[in-house]
């Protein structure tokens, strides 16, 4: 995850934007679909269009009948580039205006055919269409603002005499046509409709959608371009169905039906008869409800449920007490995959491993989460838990590796070969491939039909452990255009200039800038917040969303109250990936929700600046041995030529040190550093290092599910001979730059225990084996589990093999326990004083400073006078060098300065050796150590915690 030079590998490959880099390395949308149900041949990749035709498609719908329209004449050759109705180069942006890159002097019309019969034969259009006349027009300022990527196109205006034809045309095949004065066809193309649909059906933005009702169920779906929509209601446990007519509201384009009480619990689909540009004719698509609240196993049909039903609630759900909310600048977040949490945990019953239900027990993982909460952790961030495409939901349909993976050598290719053989049907995937945005994933349930109750049980268990819950949401794409598009073809996905779907997000990119896609996102988030009591949302590829859309999400959450909704929406945190790349880069289509653009909104973004400065290099380095502040650049060179000369290394260390300081301020744009430069004046790959207006808008991290874990990165970057004890110290120092920074702290689950993925940088589909999270310290940390999967890692195998073969790089119990203990101490220090949660840019500028330090050291001093009743200042020294140092602090001379109480009682004898000289104020810090010093007030104060500061907590 990175915003800088855009280099996207795997999932997001080869996309580049000036001066920006995206960190994404995963290929989330594995093109393997779930096993077919009895009815849905689509799951096998074949869909019936007519008795004599088949077409390979995706996952979701079945074309019941089709009357395809021809697109060319036999033997006529390919159409000219400017006469190609199969493309969609014209954009109908509102009811009055069409934008098209076409010669303005031609005679322009919109030709439309209700039966989809327009075709190109012999250089002329056939099919007897009706016409809407177009005249040369001009762009208004508002239109230019709304459609900046089209502003260079010719604007054509709908003739007022034909305005009455617009609604009819929107339910038909539409082709933009240009002819010369003699009537010769010179230009023809399909037409993109999202803009005009948003204009004509603007009232749909507030119309009721989805399933609703208590006694009498109601269903509604937005399908303004459909000829008809019907409800297919299935008999319980049967393929038999009854079809019900639905009524269209011409103002909104919404189709609805009222049911009977006997409908509750039944499975249903919609039969949408509509013109499909992709199929070139009228088709009837059988689709699930985009507002589904429940689905059948594998998502083949929607299920009509009332989420208030007692059968869908775990015991005590309505009385669930939440842990105390914390503001975003005080949040500390633990990124966790549901399956990773328990799949390898022998203390969890075998039937519950890898499921939501594992959180409700007392296995080793839950004991550890409770201990982390006691140390000060506030949130667990769950990787995608909505209904996704790439894992069969019934356990009987899944297969796991049959090999004895542990028996192979630590640098063997055999493990990854065995994992790859079952990857298409195993239990593992990160889940960044949405099917239904507002339904829990079924493969994580012990029974997919129990997903709602078990998901809620997981949330309740985490809350009772003292942790709030964040969902990773992926509204920026679907895994296929067979999701959403069959309902309103060409609307829900972002289209490029020629009408093809944008795929810069890895898959079929959605268009949150369109009103009803944006509304679907807001409605989905609110449902998760109110019906599942989710406490925060992390938006995948948030930079592909409009800033206005993210502000709408924030406003919708803020409007939720305990009294009316059972939720304090203002306590729900919101953050995401603010990367800037793809077809939307640099605000090409709208003001994006990118890092810099979100300054002042309170919405957080991941700060790649701190990550790269601490780890060294970037996620896509050809040589992974580039060193940084926390990986040996300060006095422990690894000898790799990629690090340059000694002078180049010193210059890079100075740059990394400056970036770490910016990160410690909460990436503030206006904070003035000792160099005299503001945060926004410090360079990060051509972009400003500092970009936030408040520290809570920065999410500090040094590792996440993407790319190598921190331990694996340090395995590449530290000199190979570095003792394990020193590796632990550098792991802790790196984590300290996150935990002790202003703003939100974000940590990958297991980094506090040296977690390794055996150097796998892209483990989205690497199975349980490479993604193991080992709670039993005697089992190690996962390093040496074999060469990482060939896909995405093979180029690094020459670097990886000698490391994986080295037994000195596999930590024992003592090393894992030492890292975990030190991380717990950092959390307790973070929560012990408001020094690490100053909250506002003004407070950070006023209180936080960086006294001059030796090369390889960073000293951060926070004046807590009047803020912390126990201490007048807190000083942190990050010594990344392999040598002890004395940090001069003349301002502390004569003061009662001591090592922080947590570190005084540390199990780490080295950190306990840190000391303060009361006469001079000098602070002595051992090698590879983070030491925290506190200054007591001259006049003793009562030992009462500050009202905003939790008391110092001890491990249970």
Image: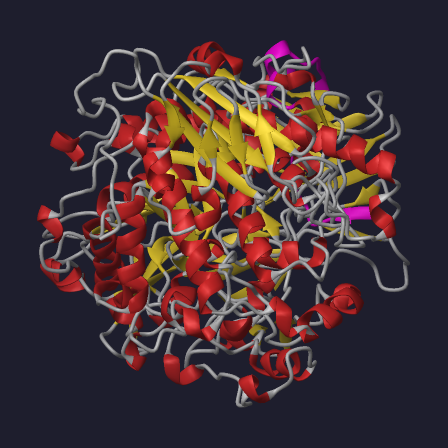
Relative to 709, is 248 on the left or the right? left
Residue placed at 41% from the left, 74% from the top? 344
Up-down: is 880 above or below 586? Answer: below
For this view, does 156 lie left or right of residue 755? right
Magenta range? 124-147
| Residue 82 located left or right of residue 259 | right
| Residue 494, percent from left and from top | 61, 41
Q: Which of the colour schemes (rainbow, by chain, secondary structure, one colour) is used?
A: secondary structure
Q: Position of residue 901 (x, y in %)?
A: 32, 36
Q: In the image, residue 310 lies at what x, y percent?
A: 10, 58
Is residue 151 visible in the rendered image? The answer is: yes
| Above or below 424: residue 724 | above
Q: In the picture provided, is 256 more to the left or to the right than 890?
A: left
Q: Residue reaching furthest front?
A: 919
Q: Quadrant of the N terminus?
A: top right
Residue at the image position 79 percent from the left and 25 percent from the top: 107
Image location of residue 489, percent across then percent down: 55, 48
Q: Considering only vertical position in the picture, is 178 above or below 270?
A: above
- Residue 134 drawn in magenta: yes
Asked if residue 572 is positioned above or below residue 214 in the image, the reply reads above
Camera-side residue of 901 and 692: 901
């Amino acid at each position: 995850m990175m915003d800088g030079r855009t280099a996207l590998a795997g999932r997001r490959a080869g996309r580049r934007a000036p001066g920006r880099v995206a960190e994404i390395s995963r290929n989330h949308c594995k093109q393997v679909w779930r096993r077919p149900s009895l009815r849905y041949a689509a799951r096998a990749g074949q869909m019936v269009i007519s008795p004599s035709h088949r077409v390979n498609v995706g996952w979701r719908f079945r074309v019941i009948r089709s009357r395809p329209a021809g697109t060319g004449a036999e033997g006529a050759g390919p159409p000219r580039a400017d006469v190609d109705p199969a493309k969609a180069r014209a954009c109908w942006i509102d009811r009055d205006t069409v934008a098209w890159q076409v010669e303005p002097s031609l005679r322009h019309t919109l030709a439309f055919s209700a039966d989809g019969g327009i075709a190109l034969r012999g250089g002329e259009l056939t099919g007897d269409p009706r016409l809407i006349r177009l005249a040369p027009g001009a762009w208004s300022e508002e239109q230019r603002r709304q459609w900046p990527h089209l502003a260079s196109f010719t604007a054509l205006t709908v003739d007022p005499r034909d305005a009455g034809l617009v609604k009819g045309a929107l339910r038909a095949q539409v082709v933009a046509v240009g002819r010369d004065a003699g009537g010769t066809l010179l230009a023809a193309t399909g037409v993109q409709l999202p803009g005009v649909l948003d204009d004509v059906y603007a009232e749909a933005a507030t119309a009721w959608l989805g399933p609703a009702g208590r006694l009498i169920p109601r269903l509604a779906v937005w399908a303004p371009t459909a000829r008809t929509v019907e409800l297919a209601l299935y008999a319980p446990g049967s393929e038999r169905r009854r079809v019900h007519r639905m009524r269209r509201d011409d103002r909104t384009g919404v189709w609805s039906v009222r049911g009977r009480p006997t409908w509750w619990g039944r499975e249903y689909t919609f039969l949408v008869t509509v013109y499909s540009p992709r199929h070139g004719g009228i088709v009837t698509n059988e689709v699930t409800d985009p507002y589904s609240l429940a689905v059948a196993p594998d998502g083949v049909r929607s299920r009509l449920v009332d989420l208030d039903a007692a059968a869908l609630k775990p015991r005590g759900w309505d009385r669930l007490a939440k842990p105390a909310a914390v503001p975003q600048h005080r949040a500390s977040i633990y990124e966790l995959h549901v399956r990773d949490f328990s799949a390898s945990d022998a203390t969890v019953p075998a039937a519950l491993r890898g499921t939501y239900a594992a959180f409700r027990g007392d296995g080793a993982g839950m004991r550890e989460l409770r201990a982390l909460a006691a140390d000060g952790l506030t949130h667990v961030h769950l990787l995608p838990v909505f209904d996704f495409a790439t894992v069969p939901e019934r356990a009987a349909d899944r297969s796991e590796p049959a090999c004895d993976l542990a028996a192979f050598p630590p640098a063997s290719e055999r493990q990854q070969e065995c994992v790859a053989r079952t990857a298409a049907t195993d239990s593992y995937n990160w889940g960044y491939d949405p099917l239904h945005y507002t339904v829990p994933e079924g493969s994580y349930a012990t029974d997919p039909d129990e997903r709602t109750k078990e998901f809620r049980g997981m949330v309740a268990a985490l809350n009772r452990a003292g942790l709030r819950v964040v969902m990773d949401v992926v509204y920026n794409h679907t895994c296929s255009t067979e999701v959403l598009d069959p309902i309103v073809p060409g609307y829900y996905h972002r289209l490029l200039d020629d009408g093809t779907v944008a795929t810069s997000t890895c898959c079929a990119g959605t268009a949150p800038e369109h009103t009803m896609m944006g509304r679907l996102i807001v409605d989905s988030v609110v449902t998760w917040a109110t019906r599942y009591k989710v406490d925060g949302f992390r938006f995948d590829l948030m930079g592909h969303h409009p800033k206005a859309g993210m502000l709408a999400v924030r406003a919708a959450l803020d409007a939720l109250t305990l009294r009316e909704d059972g939720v304090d929406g203002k306590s729900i945190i919101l953050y995401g990936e603010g990367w800037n790349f793809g077809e939307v880069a640099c605000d090409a289509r709208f003001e994006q929700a990118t890092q810099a653009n979100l300054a002042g909104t309170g919405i957080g973004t991941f700060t790649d600046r701190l990550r790269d400065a601490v780890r060294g290099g970037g996620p896509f380095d050809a040589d992974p041995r580039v060193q940084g502040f926390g990986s040996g650049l300060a006095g422990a060179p690894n000898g790799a030529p990629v690090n340059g000369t000694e002078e180049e290394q010193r210059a890079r260390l100075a740059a990394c040190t400056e970036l770490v300081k910016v990160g410690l301020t909460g990436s503030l744009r206006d904070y003035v550093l000792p160099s005299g430069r503001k945060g926004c004046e410090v360079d990060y790959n051509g972009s400003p290092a500092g970009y936030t207006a408040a520290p809570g808008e920065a999410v500090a991290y040094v590792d996440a599910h993407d790319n190598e874990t921190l331990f694996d990165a340090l395995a590449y970057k530290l000199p190979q001979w570095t003792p394990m004890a020193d590796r632990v110290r550098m792991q802790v120092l790196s984590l300290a730059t996150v935990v002790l920074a202003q703003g939100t702290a974000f940590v990958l689950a297991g980094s506090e225990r040296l977690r390794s993925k055996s150097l796998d940088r892209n483990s989205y589909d690497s199975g349980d084996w490479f993604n193991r999270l080992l709670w039993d310290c005697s089992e190690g940390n996962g390093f040496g589990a074999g060469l990482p999967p060939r896909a995405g890692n093979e180029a690094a195998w020459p670097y990886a093999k000698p490391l994986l073969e080295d037994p000195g790089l596999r930590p024992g119990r003592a090393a894992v326990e030492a890292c975990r203990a030190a991380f717990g101490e950092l959390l307790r220090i973070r929560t012990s004083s408001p020094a690490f949660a100053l909250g506002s840019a003004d407070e950070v500028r006023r209180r936080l400073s960086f006294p001059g330090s030796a090369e390889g050291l960073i000293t951060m001093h926070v004046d807590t006078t009047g803020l912390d009743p126990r201490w007048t200042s807190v000083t942190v020294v990050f010594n990344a060098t392999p040598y002890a140092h004395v940090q001069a602090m003349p301002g502390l001379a004569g003061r009662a300065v001591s090592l922080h109480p947590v570190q005084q009682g540390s199990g780490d004898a080295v950190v306990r050796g840190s000391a303060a000289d009361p006469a001079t104020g000098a602070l002595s810090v051992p090698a590879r150590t983070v030491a925290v010093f506190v200054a007591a007030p001259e006049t003793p104060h009562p030992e009462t915690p500050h009202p905003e500061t939790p008391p110092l907590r001890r491990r249970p």
